[in-house]
Amino acid sequence: MIIKNDKIMIRKMQDETHDYQLMAKWLTDDKVLEFYEGRDNPFPLERIIEAYKPQVMGDDPVIPCLVYYDKLPIGYIQYCLLDDLSENDRQTYCLNETNNVYAIDLFIGETNYWNQGIGTKILSTLVNYLFAELHAEKIVIDPHVRNTRAIRCYEKCGFEKVKILPKHELHEGKYQDSWLMVRDRNKSLN
């Protein structure tokens, strides 16, 4: 699977050392970990393989992808169909139904590419793919409330804040609040 848009290319992670090494490079970088996973929770190569190989091999519903910008690997994006959510999780995510609802998550691992609008291009590329090719009805994402750069990016891509998810994710030793943000298929961008 390859998704392309201008200088952006998204491809599914492969069961190859190089892909795992890229992830380990990014998920041991304190600047990245400050916003993704936590600086107290690095992922060296062995842990990357343990965590991501089931996804790469298709044994997990999450689809892990690497992101390239101008032919250089710069980050990670994943998506997952939420058809099998429990009733409790559907309530958490304000979903009456989960038919064709996807969750996404992403980070730019090469920090010199931050603050250039590239995250918005990456996210728009995946959102367009999910709506056009996979017929998503709704897409959800749940950034930490203090990750204002990510929240601005998501808002530029049409995501709207729905509600605070209190103490949603353990991050650096403390459960952090997150925003539930949603993009509906039928809602056009302004």
Image: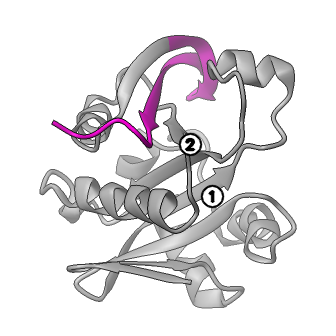
Out of 36 and 43, give the one closest to the viewer. 36
146 in relation to 151, above or below:
above
Identify the residue under disc 2. 37
**N-terminal of the two: label 1 or label 2?**
2
Are the residues at dot 1 and dot 2 in contact (C-beta closer than 8 Å)? yes
Q: Which mark is residue 188?
A: none
Q: Which mark is residue 43?
A: 1
**Is 128 left or right of 11, judged from the image as shown?**
left
Give the residue at x 70% y 21%. Answer: 96
Q: Neighbour class for label 1 at 10 Å: few (<14), some, many (≥20)?
A: many
In the image, which is nearer the foreground, mark 1 or mark 2? Answer: 2
Asked whether 187 falls inside the magenta stretch, the response is: yes
Picture coordinates of residue 75, whole percent (x, y): 41, 67
Q: Is residue 99 above or below residue 73?
A: above
42 within the magenta span: no
The quadrant of the picture occupied by the C terminus is top left
Overall secondary structure of the magenta section: strand
Q: Which portion, as a residue range, is magenta?
A: 164-190
* Residue 14 placement (x, y as % from top left): 65, 85
Residue kind at label 2, given as amino acid type: Glu
Position of the N terminus by quadrant: bottom right
Picture quadrant of residue 6: bottom left
**Residue under the image location 84 percent in, 41 percent down:** 84
**Where's residue 165, x and y in %?**
56, 14
Q: From this viewpoint, is residue 183 visible?
A: yes
Q: Indicate the secondary structure of the residue bearing disc 2.
A: loop
Which residue is pictured at 72% across the width and 15% down the height? 91
Q: Position of residue 106 (x, y in %)?
A: 46, 53
| Vertical placement of residue 141 versus 87, above or below | below
Q: Would you say residue 34 is visible in this rendering?
A: no
Q: Residue at x 57, y 88 (%)?
A: 18
